[in-house]
Amino acid sequence: MRIGIAADHGGFALKEDLRAQLTAAGHTVLDFGSYKLDRNDDFPDFVVPLSQAVASGKVERGVAVCGSGVGASICANKIPGVRASLINDHYSARQGVEDDHMNVLCLGGRVMGLANAWDLVETFLSAQYSEAERFLRRLNEIAALETKPVGAVGGPAAIPA
């Protein structure tokens, strides 16, 4: 699989280890940086290009790492077509792909070690998107949020005007 990976200084060491593991497992890895440890770098500088590559199909899935994973997740989700989530457990790594078509896995380099991170990455990459009608319907509702003005999208629980 063609995988993109990115990290700031808070996730740099984990990104480097995961990149090596992904390559050893036979994946093609595109590294969007950081390419050296720089305590003054900013995660958007790396997460945005990674997310754009996922959204455009240049890579099939992405892995974004920052100190906690929270900032990377918030940033990645600003790119239309990206469905990113901070993941800390095996169930969510699989379910996020199957049910929610998650395409960017976000991890915290300061809150987990390589063994746990690698298990989550393997689970994320091996999971397959569900084609069940209810998941596709929800995916379309989410995608509509990227193109319609605020307040124009909503179901039965929408906030009244």
Image (cartoon, rainbow, N blue to C red):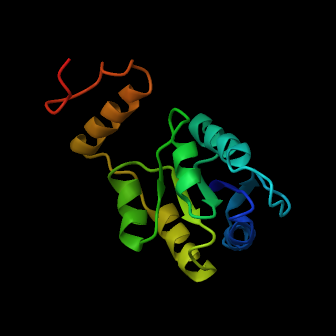
Horizontally, residue 25 falls left or right of residue 41, namely left
Residue 58 seen by the camera: no
Residue 39 to residue 75: above or below: below
Residue placed most toward the observer, 93 or 161: 161
Q: Residue at x 84, y 60 (%)?
A: 38
Q: Please state the horizontal and vertical placement of residue 131, each as a whole percent of the image.
A: 31, 46
Query: Residue most toward the left?
Result: 156
Residue 30 to residue 52: above or below: below
Q: Count numbered badges in the picture.
A: 0
Viewport quadrant of the N terminus: bottom right
Q: Please state the horizontal and vertical placement of residue 8, each as a whole percent of the image.
A: 72, 57
Q: Locate residue 153: give its quadrant.
A: top left
Q: Please state the horizontal and vertical placement of residue 148, each as a whole percent of the image.
A: 39, 19
Residue 142 seen by the camera: yes
Horizontally, residue 136 falls left or right of residue 6, namely left
Viewport quadrant of the C terminus: top left
Horizontally, residue 76 falls left or right of residue 46, namely left
Q: Please state the horizontal and vertical placement of residue 84, each as a whole percent of the image.
A: 49, 49
Q: Residue at x 60, y 80 (%)?
A: 113
Q: Locate residue 5: give its quadrant.
A: bottom right
Q: Residue at x 66, y 41 (%)?
A: 48
Q: Locate residue 9: give its quadrant.
A: bottom right
Residue 53 to residue 110: above or below: above
Residue placed most toward the observer, 68 or 135: 68
